[in-house]
Amino acid sequence: MQAQLAAELRAAVLSGALPEGTTLPGSRTLAAGLGVTRGVVAGAYAELVADGTLEAVVGRGTRVSAGAARGQLVDSPAPGWFRRPTAAPVDGPGTARGIHFRVGVATTATLDTRAWRQAWAHAARTRVSGDYSDPAGEPELRAALAAFVGRSRGLGAAPERVLVTAGSLQALNLILRLLPPASRVLLEACGYRAARQAIMDAGHHVLPLQVDADGPVIGPDTPAARLAYVTPSHQFPLGGRMSLPRRLALLEWARAHDALIVEDDYDGEFRYGAPPLPTLAGLDSSGGRVLYLGTLSKVLTPAVRTGFVVGPGALMPALVRARTLLDSGHPLPVQHALLHLLRTGEIDRHIRRTRRWHAGVRAALTQILEPLAPHVTLGGIEAGLHVCLHLSPAHDAREVAAELARHGVFVSTLHPYTFDGPVPNALLLGYGGLTAHEAAAGAREIVRVLTQKAVAARRARRPARPAQV
């Protein structure tokens, strides 16, 4: 009890609750108030006098020593050299009620909850080690991921060339650590906002890579850089697929400039009737230019926070070192659960179920929107979990988005994703987290708003009738 009382009094002094010079109650008075013996209080006072927190003055009692109290704690300003960053360029969950066409989300409606629980039960039964795990990922999981990417994307990879990461964004941050300071990095001019911010935060310079229907434009004027970051399977956010000639041209650019390529295949498992194109990593005959990023966020759920890098053997030790210094590796229970899902074939079955689910949502969405052509056209519908609704010049994308929000349908424009060149006049419709019913309802509201605006525009252009005499 004496130690507890001494600790409480010391904390009150340090926090400023008992300011400098405060006189404490006499030992008898405080003992009576606390319901303890006088010896407990006298002992606590003596301990605090001994360490300088309190001072005992004959005839004036016991009080807080000069310099012992910190004063009332306030939120002090940051150091003068600190520059407050802008908010991270990622979309948070929608809070307003309505239909949210959010990109980057996946459905869990197709998840086999029984298989999911079995996977985590398996992880719970696995022996717990008191040591750190392999920072590259458990060898068995790396082998299973190598086999998985071979089945799903036709990319042959040895387990030694696989690094388990906490998602694609962490993988990119690890890769950026490999570059010399202030390197130049090519990035799609209309592309992934978080990737651009990560490149700049790492102290590198972003150069725009223009994009058209065939993907990033590569030619004689493409500048030299240390790294190029691309999304060739389903360009984010426009949705086009990088043609084979463009892929070969990018690989030749990397060879000519001694550069690396980051191939972010964030939703390559979802294709709807379109034949798969070979990955850049698979086309890289030298095997030393492309770092392939895969993720289980769209395949399963972002909640598992798991992705992987398939990289050149010469770079893997440096990537593993970077992961070691960052966080020493991936949580073992997560690795064991995912390994169980891969080994039992549940992830492959889940992908087949989910692909059918998303195909149904996509069909419901496109069936209602396609009749708007040719004034409004859909892009990027062959793959992935989002489409781009390209509007005619008569419709301003931001005005349409604002009008839709007033009616409970929330979409994005391409303004936040474009950092160079003209901003495509389009709406970004992510349907990964929607049901077919929700997507259809949202599409009908889009059609209604666009039709209403088109009618109003025609009326505004109609010449006024002459006044009747």
Image: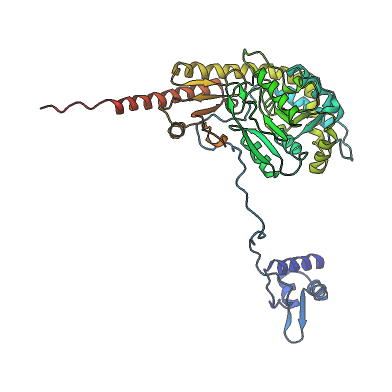
Q: Residue at x 67, y 41 (%)?
A: 205
Please tell me in which quadrant of the rendered image residue 349 appears: top right
Image quarter (top left, top right, bottom left or bottom right) of the C terminus: top left
| In this picture, residue 303 sits left or right of residue 451 | right
Q: Nearer the viewer, residue 359 or 326?
A: 326
Residue furthest bottom as drawn:
59
Q: Position of residue 459 (x, y in %)?
A: 30, 26
Q: Position of residue 242 (x, y in %)?
A: 64, 21
Q: Position of residue 178 (x, y in %)?
A: 78, 38
| In this picture, residue 65 sits left or right of residue 91 | right
Q: Position of residue 104 (x, y in %)?
A: 62, 30
> Would residue 291 be seen by someone viewing this image from the given angle?
no
> Would residue 85 be seen by someone viewing this image from the given angle?
yes
Please tell me in which quadrant of the rendered image residue 208 appears: top right
Please tell me in which quadrant of the rendered image residue 26 appears: bottom right
Q: Nearer the viewer, residue 125 or 266?
A: 266
Q: Nearer the viewer, residue 365 or 460?
A: 460
Total numbered circles: 0
Q: Residue at x 48, y 17 (%)?
A: 370
Classify 131 as above or below 220: below
Q: Residue at x 81, y 40 (%)?
A: 322
